[in-house]
Image (cartoon, rainbow, N blue to C red):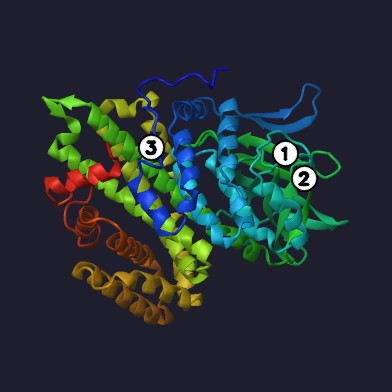
Amino acid sequence: MPDTDREPPAAAAEPADLFSGDVALVEAVRRHGAEQHAGRLRDLGSVAGSPRSLRWAEFVDRYPPTLRTHDAFGERVDEVEYHPAWHRLMQAGVRAGLTAAAWTQGGATLPHTARAAALLLWSQTETGHITALSTTYAAAPALRNDPELEAEWLPRFASRAYESGLRPAAQKLGATAGMAVTERAGGTDLRATTTVARPEGKGYLLTGHKWFVSAPMSDAFLVLAQAPGGLTTFLVPRVVPDGRRNAWHLHRLKTTLGTRSTGVAEVELDRTWGERVGEEGRGLRVLGQTTGALRLDGVLSAAGLMRSCMVRAVRHARGREVLGSLLVDKPLMQNVLADLAVESEAATILGMRLAAAVDAGETDLLRVALPVAKYWVAKRTPAVAAEALECLGGNGYVEEHGLARLYRAAVLPSLWEGTGNATALDVLRAMSLQPRAMEVLLAEIDRARGADARLDRTMDDVAAFLQAAAREARRDPAAVEAGARWMVERLAVALQASLVVRYCPPAVTTAFLATRVAGSGGVLPGTLPVGRRTTQAIVDRALPQ
């Protein structure tokens, strides 16, 4: 197997501190009061930008995991074997506190804000293993429904020690959690779950199939099943307390478009032992408590991916000479790079604002802002990746340069924790059932009122549409549903614009308002209707030399 410690090809990238070089992220950490974590973030940024980490990312994509269902004696083992680089990445991510550590720390330390900055940095290495880190983070809120399970499992999920291999969780220094929810027939309709759970002693025995299980070698999984009292969430360990392996049969690993490193599995549960999380019949409510955490990570990892794509494009343009001058100085290329930088910065400040809201307990804001942000940032990511790849020309299409891997991964955030339609419909649901949440979101947007007439008009248009939609919903709900994407898009742009106006310098603000709010310029990146001084200032801010 290849040596994971050798240096990558010189074309990959030079070593860099990804934190100190990201002005927008540094400002966001300071703005939200988390500067006490700056030293650790610089250390993580240096690890994330090192040639060794880039080589780990290259290897886990080139050598995807393999499934071993039986041992030499015909006994079921149901193990997924990963390249050593996967475990190096996981070890670094766990050590950085990207699992559940934030849920065990006091709010005064702003743990979720610090973790968000760290995730945004670390997701610039490789996105597949981020899934296992994210689901472990997201499992923690669900455990609050059972104090005994929380006391037993949360310290394991919050540990900064990573141990691979299947053993009783009590014998390990740390543990990871996964999600086993989706079924072939149900998809996003979780009420169509067919897996059944029957009481057995102190637990339940689960029987059924799960269609899309990421990180199948996690130590425990949150599983949705039909109990006698209705749809219920269960905690299912891979190894039961007496040391026996649970009945967790891996049928196959799916071949996916991108993030090949994670190993997405189809799983059969055959009288598989699990413990109930919360009351019977409240499974969707319990599992829903993980949704916000997963969506926040979707925004942050997408923002990190955008940042990585943009940085690679800028570095290439600064090192490439064309017709007597550097490519970065060509007006048209500079416009493209500036446009990518604007998109990246807007995603960064939005993700960090939402993470700060978790620390502040702004639940009403998060109820609507998270699905709005996840929908929009995820949809913008593939376009950024594609344009950045094109900046490298044919080299961008070559695997060794890394952008091809990022381009394949860019589609995943839109599918993660709800497709675009499912996310947009969730915003409508919140608007109907929790109008207070929508009011809080509009108030957050309105904090920038008066700064620019174009943004004021957009705020008024969105508010008028929401009022009309509320009236129309009583007469024709289908008509409102058909406009859900438009509504979410305008909310997302208005929210980003409000943050940009308040926190970004004039060059970025001018470009964002002219294009995303006023609709000037073109549809595709690289059509900013601004001058050379503005585009130069944006590129210089995005990646200081």
Q: Residue 393 placed where, x, y %?
A: 25, 29
Q: Residue 544 placed where, x, y %?
A: 28, 40
The residue wearing badge 2 is: 270
Q: Residue at x 78, y 55 (%)?
A: 275
Looking at the rendering, which quadrant does residue 143 occupy?
bottom right
Residue 429 drawn above or below residue 132: below
Residue type at the position of mark 2: Asp
Quadrant housing the C terminus: top left
Residue 211 drawn above or below residue 420: above
Instruction: Give the mark toward the camera: 1 or 3.
Output: 3
CA separation, marks 2 and 1?
8 Å
Q: Residue 457 placed where, x, y %?
A: 23, 72
Q: Residue 267 placed where, x, y %?
A: 67, 42
Specify the label residue 407 is tagged with.
3
Circles 2 and 1, Cβ within 8 Å, touching? The answer is: yes
Residue 4 drawn above or below residue 310: above
Q: Residue at x 59, y 54 (%)?
A: 102
Q: Residue at x 31, y 72 (%)?
A: 462
Circles 1 and 3, Cβ within 8 Å, touching? The answer is: no
Q: Closer to the camera, 290 or 249?
A: 290
Q: Closer to the camera, 66 or 115?
A: 115
Looking at the rendered structure, the secondary structure element under dot 3 is helix
Q: Choose the circle earlier in sequence order: 1 or 3.
A: 1
Specify the label residue 249 is tagged with.
1
Label 1: few (<14), some (14–19) or many (≥20) C-alpha neighbours in 10 Å:
some
Question: Is 535 left, or right, of 102 in this rendering?
Answer: left
Residue type at the position of mark 1: His
Looking at the rendering, which quadrant does residue 492 occupy?
bottom left
Q: Residue at x 46, y 35 (%)?
A: 48
Residue 351 appears in the picture as rendered? no
Residue type at the position of mark 3: Tyr
Quadrant housing the N terminus: top right
